[in-house]
Amino acid sequence: MKRTNKKGGAAIVAVLIVIMLVAVGSAALVVTGRYTIQASKVADAVVKVNSKPEESSSEEVSEVDDLSSVVEEPVSNYPVKSANYQDINIKGMTANSAILVDADTNEIVAGYNYEKKVYPASLTKMLTLLVAAENIQDMDATYKFTSDDIDPLIEDNASRAGFEAGETVTMKDLLYSAILVSGADGTTGLANAVAGSEEKFVELMNAKIQELGLTGTKFVNASGLHNKNHYSTAQDIAVITKAAMDNETCREVLTATKYTTSKTKQHKDGIELTSIVAQRIEGYYVDCDGDGEADDGISIEGGKTGFTDEAKYTLSTILDDNGHTYICVTTKSKDELKSVEDQIAIYEKYLGGKASDNKDKDSKTDTDTSSVSEVED
């Protein structure tokens, strides 16, 4: 019988055990290490503005490319059709798409072409407002404009609040200027203050779009200036409006009628901003019962206007009906007055899900459905 080398066999077994332990430990490090990396990316993706902002690395932000392992699937925020849903059918309406949403129940009261892709114009700024408000910790933090901020806006003939190169304003000033007077200088300041550039800020905007579960919207800038790849739908804008109204800061801005910016060297008394929405709806009222007078307890509280040559007149409004909130969005109305009249007609006929029996029962809208903006993906 051949003599067995017991010591050699024991050594081999010991080596195998060590190899197995190393392999198991390495696997554990890979798994836990991957989770740690992904979690840190989530933290880097949220840019916070405070009174003493820290410098952030653009490389850290650009690394955020796959959060699927730690970020939950987006939950759809789309409203559902109410039991009393009706297709919008109003004589003389010029909007090519429209939706009326009960914001308290998240139900669609009435609609027309509301899933069609359209150019939103400055309705974009409501998402800019929301993303900025969610990422700003100190509303008194400041931003100093440069000529690189202002000059391109002048060249593009973009609407502006009137801030000048070298002027230092607060985050609060920027929020109100972006919404009340649709200032592209306000959105530029917000984008740069929050994310370092408009490009990076748009990444945050599109991340918010995904978070809201919106499938019909893609933005390429923070102001709504025309771009064929910048689009939305009336329904998506209604969801964005509701999300903004659910944020206390955004709600205050969207429903404000006036605001005066901080006093600066360039504007010693500040800039007085008056809501374009408030100006547009002045003199109008909602008369659901048809008695020729404004209904008690019903008023349009605020919202956002929009216009470009391609988008025509877009409008999102928030209406309070004795404590109940409704949102109406219309796109591509004929002119600024028609955009308001389109919405008033919708509110009067469908408010509360009750279509008036004596108003345009068999009427048709004046909108040619073939003219609905089909925006390229």
Image: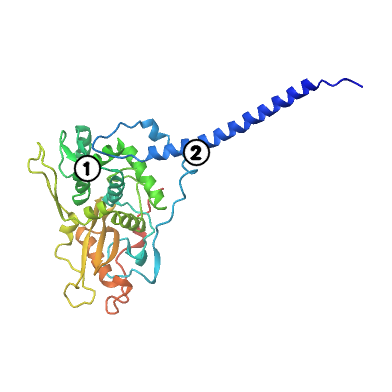
Relative to 300, 370 lies left or right:
right
Q: Position of residue 369 (x, y in %)?
A: 36, 62
CA gap, disc 1 and disc 2: 35 Å
Q: Earlier in the sequence, mark 1 or mark 2?
A: 2
Badge 1 crowding class, 10 Å Cα cut-off, few under 14, some 14 to 19, many 20 or more, is many
Please state which amino acid type lies under the numbered disc 2: Tyr
Query: Residue visible at 24% across and 60% down?
Result: 339
Q: Which picture quadrant has residue 346?
A: bottom left
Please state which amino acid type lies under the numbered disc 1: Met
Q: Is residue 158 visible?
A: no
Could you tell me how many numbered marks the image carries? 2
Badge 2 crowding class, 10 Å Cα cut-off, few under 14, some 14 to 19, many 20 or more, is some
Relative to 36, 238 lies left or right:
left
Query: In which quadrant will I find the N terminus?
Result: top right
Along the viewing direction, whichever of 320 and 286 lies nearer the viewer: 320
Residue beneath disc 2: 35
Number of the label disc, if any, that sits on residue 95: none
Along the viewing direction, whichever of 99 and 1 lies nearer the viewer: 1
Q: Secondary structure at mark 1?
A: helix
For the view shown, which residue lies furthest in the left direction?
Answer: 268
Residue beneath disc 1: 171
Q: Position of residue 345 (x, y in %)?
A: 25, 68
Q: Is residue 20 visible?
A: yes
Relative to 345, 67 lies left or right:
right
